[in-house]
């Protein structure tokens, strides 16, 4: 019997308010089989059989496999393996259906919003959203107005960050429709988990994630300029020193396309070309992993070496598609986020399937006063930031920090939002003491090819390793977990109805049907053929000579 | 060169390639059993065993660990990696005076370190190890062997085994578009997935993947490439050109199958893939036999039989 769950419920830090929702146990004080939620029961029994030393051994194997594969990130100038926790997060299929629908709805609404913002701006005219809000957004780029891909998609890839609140309900934490990263970890986490902890997979039916590159390539090709029969797709990376470089190489490799840097491209005659040994080759779709400001020195930062001058012109002429579209950042603005429920009603006529986290807009003088008063119990975030930069958790901040923050808030109310402290749900995670509850979020990835929004079953679960820490980001010492969408029933019915769909889902890893052709025995060297006795004979011979 | 030595070199080549090929196929397929929730373990394992030319009891349930035993670690199973590694080493021992020390040591230590059991979480590591050892052995030969007959026979063995391994894999495929996706698996199991993606830029389709593995002139694991390479080796072993035709049976067989593959419309090949792959496997066996007849003649083993009255 293992000792992994000993002392699971013993938490040192207690916050005010409701305790967080634990994903594995309904009552963390009595972590045990009877309390394990259905989805986690199999994992619990498998883990309960292991000892700490055993699980730690496996975790080390995960890490060394990542080191060997080069799945690393830079930590203070040193290459560290990307932290992956051995305990997976499980989401039952029935629950996943809601998440999937919610993400789809959100992406569609964001598409409509971006099309409107860089087009007619009807939402402004109809008074749904104030014009000053859009024009004051740091990531609103006038230069992008009127540029749209042939199939009208701006958000080829999105990563909508979700969390579960104290009662286990899903909520949207923020939208990421610029260059959401992390999908490579979803793919490589799954592979290395199956290699190192196969017994966890035995009893569960986990939906595969390997189809992502195909979907992405499909969406990118679908976005190609009109009239291009066989579009040339490239992935544009800032270069080897970028922290997500591993992801860029993985995606390029799995899509079978070139990975280019800015210096490999040039623009001429309103088209984009890449330099190859066979001369210039036309580029039709650029999946760019370079930020807007660095894409085109003629339009944005003049000192950028990462893009290519003339890129925006080529895009405006409709000769190249930049994915995701330039200027998407306006939708990531946290103040726009607060308008999303209204925008969804306005554009889609639907109520949001996954609600936002309650948020104060500080521009409103009344809420600014309230927030300033209650600063020590709220979370305050800069609207343009991502990855937890500049975020202040009120209850954890010192008095001095809060005073400084008050000054900032008064000076620039447009630049900040405030939210109540949401206790993110917790999942058992291996730390120094053994398995302990740690806060986690989820980033599901969605690919929009213009006809459908496909949501990768699973996504990246990020977990904060320090106790009580609510900011989950790998740049802030966060780990990750493999995320499993499991459950058979809804899929079984699909299997009967639309067999092709399931075949599609399982695309990357379908088994091989048996054709019983005659089986050919392997050939062998006459002396090595099975059941030969020459060896024996030779030995006997030498034995005989010795006599 | 002594026939016996040549024969050993030929078989070292085949066994090294076989251990490598088997490790690749097993790695991908065993992984698949874990990753794909819809796979039926018994059926999948059975199909895998039959591809590798192993018969199993009809009634028994075959599991992942059975496959691992039969095809990887059991030294007595003729299709297992352990068997191949052992046989490669035995052949090197028979030809020790020609095989250079480096290669001998690689083969010898590989056999010695071959585990008798592999824990389920170390399976992938094990296969990686086998592949690395094979790469090391081949690399030593490639970098430090005279391009003489010894090298030719070694490469001949490798090429023939490669063609055989790829044919085995392809023979399992039914070629309706509906079950197309598993081409990804097939490509991965011969290490061709990334090469394929770079060549065709996109999702594997039945036709293109089959084309790639059968007929690609540049991909070194395609059947056509392997067969052509085997022919080359034979021509260099026996450079005399006939005025007409080809007198060497092995070359004739290889030439026939190569023309068959190269000049028949791809669609024809693909609609009846199992039959054609069957032909390739038969040819490799026949070629192996023809080479033996021609280059490795041995005395018939004398055997005493009882007097017939």
Image (tube, rainbow, N blue to C red):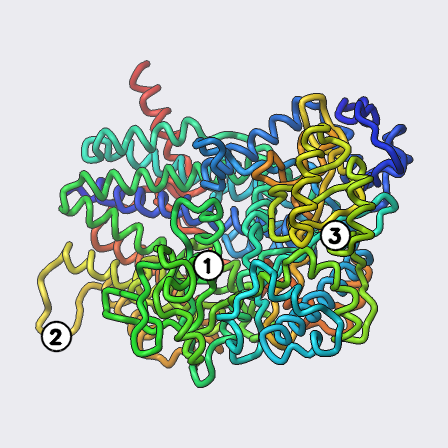
Asked whether, in this view, residue A68 is left or right of residue A361, the answer is: left
Task: Give me the chain letter of mark 3.
Answer: A
Residue at point 43% right, 62% down?
A300
Question: Mark 3 or 1 closer to N-term?
Answer: 1
Circle 3 packing at 10 Å, graded few (<14), some (14-19), many (20+), is: many
Circle 2 packing at 10 Å, graded few (<14), some (14-19), many (20+), is: few
The residue tagged 2 is B244
Seen in the picture, residue B230 relative to B11 is either above or below; the reply is below
Q: Which mark is residue A362?
A: 3
The quarter of the image holding the N terminus of chain A is: top right
The residue tagged 1 is A293
Seen in the picture, residue B19 relative to A148 is either above or below; the reply is above
Q: Position of residue A286 (x, y in %)?
A: 44, 67
Task: Report the mark closest to the observer, 3 or 1.
Answer: 3
Circle 1 packing at 10 Å, graded few (<14), some (14-19), many (20+), is: some
Q: Position of residue A518 (x, y in %)?
A: 52, 63
Residue sitting nearer the eye, A514 or B3 = A514
Q: Position of residue A504 (x, y in %)?
A: 63, 68
Task: Report the mark closest to the observer, 3 or 2.
Answer: 3
Residue sitting nearer the eye, B67 or A522 = B67
Q: Are marks 3 and 1 on the same chain?
A: yes
Alpha carbon separation for disc pair 3 and 1 = 27 Å
The quarter of the image holding the C terminus of chain A is: top left
Asked whether, in this view, residue A460 is left or right of residue A248, the answer is: right
Based on the displayed image, in which of its 4 quarters is residue B11 positioned?
top left
């Amino acid at each position: 019997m293992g000792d992994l769950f000993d002392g699971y419920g013993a938490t040192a830090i207690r916050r005010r308010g409701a305790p967080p929702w634990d994903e594995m146990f309904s009552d963390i004080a009595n972590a045990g089989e009877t309390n394990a939620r259905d989805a986690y029961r199999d994992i619990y029994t498998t883990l309960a059989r292991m000892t700490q030393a055993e699980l730690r051994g496996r975790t080390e194997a995960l890490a060394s496999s990542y080191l060997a594969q080069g799945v690393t990130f830079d930590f203070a100038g040193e290459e560290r393996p990307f932290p992956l926790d051995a305990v997976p997060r499980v989401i039952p299929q029935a629950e996943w259906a809601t998440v999937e629908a919610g993400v789809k709805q959100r992406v569609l609404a964001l598409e409509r919003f971006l099309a409107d913002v860089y087009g007619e701006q009807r939402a402004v005219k109809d008074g749904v959203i104030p014009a000053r809000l859009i024009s004051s957004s740091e990531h609103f780029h006038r230069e992008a107005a009127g540029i749209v891909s042939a199939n009208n998609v701006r958000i080829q890839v999105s990563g909508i960050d979700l969390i579960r609140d104290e009662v286990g309900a899903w909520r949207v934490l923020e939208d990421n429709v610029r260059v959401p990263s992390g999908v490579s970890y979803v793919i490589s986490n799954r592979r290395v988990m199956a290699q190192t902890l196969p017994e966890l997979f035995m009893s569960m039916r986990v939906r595969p994630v390997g189809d992502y590159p195909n979907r992405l390539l499909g969406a990118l090709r679908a976005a190609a300029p009109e009239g291009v029969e066989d579009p040339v797709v490239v992935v544009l990376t800032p270069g080897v020193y970028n922290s997500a470089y591993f992801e860029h190489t993985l995606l390029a490799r799995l899509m079978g396309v070139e990975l280019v840097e800015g210096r490999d491209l040039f623009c001429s005659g309103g088209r984009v070309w890449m330099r190859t040994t066979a001369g210039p080759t036309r580029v039709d779709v650029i999946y760019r992993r370079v930020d807007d400001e660095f894409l085109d020195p003629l339009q944005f930062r003049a000192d950028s070496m990462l893009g290519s001058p003339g890129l925006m012109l080529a895009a405006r002429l409709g000769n190249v598609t930049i994915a995701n579209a330039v200027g998407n950042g306006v939708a990531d603005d946290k103040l726009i986020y607060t308008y999303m429920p209204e925008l969804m009603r306005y554009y889609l006529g639907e109520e949001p399937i996954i609600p936002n986290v309650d948020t104060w807009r500080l521009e409103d003088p009344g809420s600014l006063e309230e927030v300033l008063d209650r600063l020590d119990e709220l979370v305050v975030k800069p609207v343009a930031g991502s990855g937890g930069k500049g975020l202040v958790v009120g209850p954890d901040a010192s008095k001095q920090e809060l005073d400084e923050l008050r000054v900032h808030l008064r000076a620039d109310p447009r630049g900040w939002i405030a939210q109540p402290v949401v206790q993110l749900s917790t999942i058992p995670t291996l730390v120094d003491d053994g398995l302990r509850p740690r806060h986690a979020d989820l980033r599901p990835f969605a690919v929009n090819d213009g006809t459908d929004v496909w949501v990768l079953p699973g996504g990246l679960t990020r977990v904060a390793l320090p106790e009580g820490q609510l900011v989950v980001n790998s740049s802030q010492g966060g780990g990750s977990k493999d995320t499993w969408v499991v459950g058979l029933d809804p899929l079984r019915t699909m299997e009967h109805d639309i067999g092709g769909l399931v075949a599609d889902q399982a695309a990357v890893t379908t088994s091989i049907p048996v054709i019983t052709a005659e089986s050919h025995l392997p050939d062998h060297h006459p002396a090595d053929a099975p059941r030969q006795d020459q060896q024996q004979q030779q030995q006997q011979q030498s034995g005989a000579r010795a006599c | 060169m002594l026939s016996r030595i040549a024969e050993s070199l030929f078989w070292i080549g085949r066994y090294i390639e076989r251990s490598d090929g088997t490790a690749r196929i097993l790695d991908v397929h065993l992984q698949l059993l874990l990753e794909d929730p819809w796979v039926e373990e018994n059926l999948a394992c059975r199909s895998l065993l039959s591809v590798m030319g192993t018969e199993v009891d009809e009634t028994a349930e075959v599991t992942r660990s059975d496959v691992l035993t039969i095809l990887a670690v059991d030294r007595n199973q003729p299709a297992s990696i352990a068997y191949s590694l052992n046989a490669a080493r035995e052949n090197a021992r028979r030809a020790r005076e020609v095989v250079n020390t480096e290669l001998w040591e690689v083969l010898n230590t590989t056999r010695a370190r071959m585990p008798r059991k592999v824990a389920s979480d170390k399976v992938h590591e094990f296969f990686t190890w086998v592949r690395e050892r094979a790469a090391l052995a081949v690399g030593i030969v490639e970098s430090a062997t005279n391009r003489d007959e010894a090298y030719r026979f070694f490469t001949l063995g490798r090429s023939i085994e490669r063609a055989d391994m790829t044919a085995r894999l392809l023979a399992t495929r039914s070629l309706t578009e509906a079950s197309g996706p598993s081409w990804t698996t097939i490509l991965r199991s011969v290490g061709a997935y990334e090469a394929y993606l770079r060549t065709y830029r996109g999702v594997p389709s039945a036709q293109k993947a089959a084309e790639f593995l059968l007929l690609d002139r540049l991909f070194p694991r395609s059947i056509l490439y392997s067969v052509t390479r085997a022919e080359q080796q034979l021509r260099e072993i026996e450079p005399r050109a006939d005025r007409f035709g080809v007198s060497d049976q092995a070359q004739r067989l290889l030439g026939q199958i190569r023309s068959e593959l190269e000049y028949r419309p791809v669609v024809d090949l693909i609609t009846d893939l199992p039959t054609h792959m069957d032909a390739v496997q038969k040819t490799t066996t026949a070629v192996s036999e023809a080479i033996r007849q021609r280059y490795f003649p041995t005395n018939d083993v004398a055997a005493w039989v009882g007097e017939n009255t």
